[in-house]
Image (tube, coloured by chain):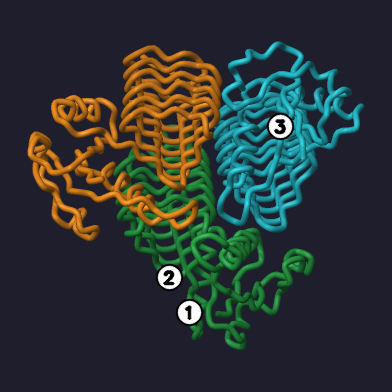
Chain colours: A orange, B cyan, C green
């Protein structure tokens, strides 16, 4: 398959690392072969940013209509920006590509939405559902029976305890913790290191231990 | 071997995920073969909870005396409940089964008690001792020379620094940290995200950064 | 190669665990062969500390001039002590040995300095540079484009977000978080569980969420 990355920042770097690991993995059978067509981004990407990987910017996101590729990955770290890119990509014929780093661990009954990205050392327990275009970053842990909706970002090292529910496009900061059975509302943001001890409504920013919001 | 799980909640899901990973692992030689006889639980377990894995509830915990199995695993996440189940199991002839997820990493000189459960991405350093029926959960880190007593629960992402000592049945919350050389007393509970900077006595609940108790 | 360890405390235990894992690894091709000549330490090391691994203290650090070995590893957990040992080692002909635990994950474009130690379950993203004799401990996460200088210690479970910069010899405590694009000055210390939300100057101690310093 031939993939185009939408976005040229740090999240694209992380996704490229995962694609290289998928191409290279030597345990669990042969690697798969993923070819990267290039980067589409609205801002100019410095050639040296991805040049050492043999990859370069080949246009802006509206050029998606002209691109010789079968799949895309929305490489934007934050939920709103990622949704915006996906909305534009949906006008075209490419399919979203779902990335699971070979160093992630997922229970066999996890259900993952199209375009989700699961990075290295993430750990996803039994009976979890992960929505479309959600991102579970390096070393993040998702406990049993969690429901992770579309466009969610779980940042590195965050821990979502069992039976929790994360609404569309919410963001859980690095090393933050959500306690068992709680919910975080759509498009809310939980700060780095925060500990969520009660339900968090939609669209708020919650910080601290315990997490408080305005 | 043929194993019965005691408890039908989320911790049973986590343990089943680890058993599947042990059966399936394709690196480091062939997988082992673990057959799960079923779930024993005092409360009714919905058939759909484990049905997709081909596993069902076959009685309550007192039915252990009738069960055709060689080993049991106490699948209760919290220390006191787990000890209570183990006390009942000890009246019968089954042996406790010790679970080490193939994606955990343990130094070669770690000593692990019977019935302990070590989940995915846990990391246990040199010269650590882990007690009977202790649980080291996903992504938790135990530093060199730690002494982890029986029935302890170290929750996901928690970090126990080197030379620390955790007493019987204490619980260390998700993403919490215990600093080097400190002790947490028996049956104490350390809250999620807390940072333990002094010795914690038995039976207290300690929360915050630094962790305070009543 | 034949390696001598400088230091006989807990960090030497962690390094020995990583060397054993390198010798033993059965995926990704055959293991490498690393022979450990012994421990050099200024304090007396109890024989039982490393005896179960077949390793013993063979002198103090000044005996480095007499040792039959090709490489050394500075096994001191804290940055200032590690630099002091490296300064003494540099008077001799041995080369520093760089340790990457086979259970760590590093993007293919990470650049690592001589003598750095990367422990199990560490995760280092794209385009990161790691300085000489830096240590990235168990389960620590370093985000894309970070610049980690010489002698830095990133403790277990700490998360360094993308584009951050850690100055020479700074220490990031267990489960601490540094937010995106921030810098921590040389020889500063960030406490366990702290959340760094603004630049941290050199030589200070910063604690709490958000991290404050005197």
Q: Position of residue A158 (x, y in %)?
A: 46, 33
Asked which quadrant contains residue A155, the reply is top left
Q: In this orientation, which residue lies closer to the viewer: B178 or A24? A: A24
Chain under callout 2: C
In terms of secondary structure, where does tag 1 sit? strand
Count of marks, rendered view: 3
Residue tagged by mark 2? C114
Circle number at residue C95: 1
Please state if B39 lies on the left or on the right of B49 as rendered: right
Q: Position of residue C42 (x, y in %)?
A: 66, 73
Give me the C-alpha separation between circle 1 and circle 2: 8 Å
Say whether marks 3 and 1 touch (CB < 8 Å). no
Circle number at residue A148: none
Q: In this orientation, which residue lies closer to the viewer: A207 or C32? A: C32
Give me the C-alpha separation between circle 3 and circle 1: 52 Å
Q: Residue at x 39, y 21 (%)?
A: A206
Residue tagged by mark 3? B36
Q: Position of residue B22 (x, y in %)?
A: 63, 43
Task: Give the mark, 1 or 2, whose residue is nearer the N terminus.
Answer: 1
In the picture, which quadrant includes the N terminus of chain C? bottom right
């Amino acid at each position: 398959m031939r993939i185009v990355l939408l976005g040229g920042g740090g999240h694209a770097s992380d996704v490229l690392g995962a694609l290289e690991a998928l191409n290279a993995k030597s345990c669990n059978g042969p690697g798969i072969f993923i070819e990267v067509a290039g980067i589409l981004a609205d801002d100019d990407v410095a050639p040296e940013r991805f040049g050492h990987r043999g990859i370069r910017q080949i246009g802006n996101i509206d050029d998606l209509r002209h691109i010789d590729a079968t799949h895309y990955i929305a490489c934007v770290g934050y939920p709103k920006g990622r949704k915006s890119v996906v909305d534009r990509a949906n006008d075209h014929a490419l399919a979203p590509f779902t990335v699971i780093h070979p160093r992630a661990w997922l229970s066999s009954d996890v259900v993952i939405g199209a375009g989700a990205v699961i990075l290295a050392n993430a750990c996803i327990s039994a009976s979890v559902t992960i929505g479309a275009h959600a991102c579970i970053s390096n070393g993040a842990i998702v406990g049993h029976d969690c429901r992770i909706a579309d466009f969610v970002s779980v940042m590195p090292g965050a821990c979502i305890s069992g039976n929790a529910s994360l609404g569309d496009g919410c963001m859980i900061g690095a090393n933050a913790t959500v306690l068992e059975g709680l919910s975080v509302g759509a498009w809310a943001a939980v700060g780095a290191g925060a500990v969520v001890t009660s339900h968090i409504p939609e669209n708020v920013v919650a910080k601290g231990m315990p997490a408080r919001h305005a």
